Amino acid sequence: MKTFRIKTHRLNQNYSEPHFFILNKGLNSGKPLNEPCPNCFVCITTNESEKDFMYWLCFGLWKSKSFHYYLKGSVIPFITIGDIKKHLRDSECIASKHPQLFHQSIHHLKLLEVNEEKLKLSLKMIDTAKKAIFYKLMNKTGTV
């Protein structure tokens, strides 16, 4: 069983232990973050390997929309610290029973994340090329 604590993040608070942040408001509640934001919890672990384990566990749960069950509120949905702690502890127990399968799944998630970033960059470059082509056309015709 992994050792982790979840607390409400306070602005300008620094943490010496390995940690990551978890968004707690909106439809992306449960999303793990490397940088803090005003509406987040902090998950503090005892070492980097536990941080990595918990980060990717949280990422997988968020991607599978498993936190949506716990959302409360009608205008701005949010997740409570108690719900996130319970869900992460329960999920951590399940993932720890099958460590090989979990690590294999995390490896695939990381590869997919890298590919997704490459595709986003390619789409951004395509968009820039489209703008440049049209700008060049308008510049030649004298309308810009």
Image (tube, rainbow, N blue to C red):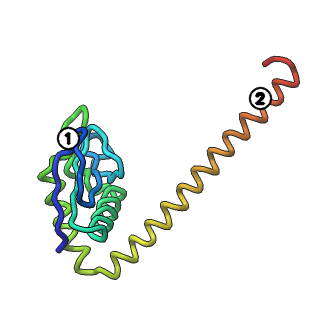
Q: Nearer the viewer, residue 36 or 91?
A: 36
- Disc on res. 24: none
Q: Nearer the viewer, residue 54 or 100?
A: 54
Q: Residue at x 27, y 57 (%)?
A: 19
Q: Quadrant of residue 73?
A: top left
Q: Nearer the viewer, residue 72 or 106?
A: 106
Q: Residue at x 32, y 53 (%)?
A: 32
Q: The N terminus appears in which quarter of the rendering?
A: bottom left
Q: Quadrant of residue 53?
A: bottom left
Residue underneath mark 1: 10
Q: Are marks 2 and 1 in contact (CB under 8 Å)?
A: no
What amino acid type is highlighted by mark number 2?
Answer: Tyr
Mark 1, secondary structure of its residue: loop
Residue underneath mark 2: 135
Which one is in front in this view, the residue at disc 2 or the one at disc 1?
1
On the rendered structure, is 1 left or right of 109? Answer: left
Q: CA distance from mark 2 to mark 1?
A: 46 Å
Mark 2 crowdedness (10 Å alpha carbons): few <14, some 14-19, many ≥20? some
Q: Nearer the viewer, residue 19 or 12?
A: 12
Q: Position of residue 64 (x, y in %)?
A: 34, 59
Q: Residue at x 26, y 74 (%)?
A: 95
Q: Position of residue 102 (x, y in %)?
A: 33, 75
Residue extending furthest toward the left: 82
Q: Position of residue 6 (x, y in %)?
A: 17, 55
Mark 1 crowdedness (10 Å alpha carbons): few <14, some 14-19, many ≥20? some
Q: Residue at x 48, y 60 (%)?
A: 113
Name above or below for residue 114 compared with residue 15.
below
What amino acid type is highlighted by mark number 1?
Answer: Arg
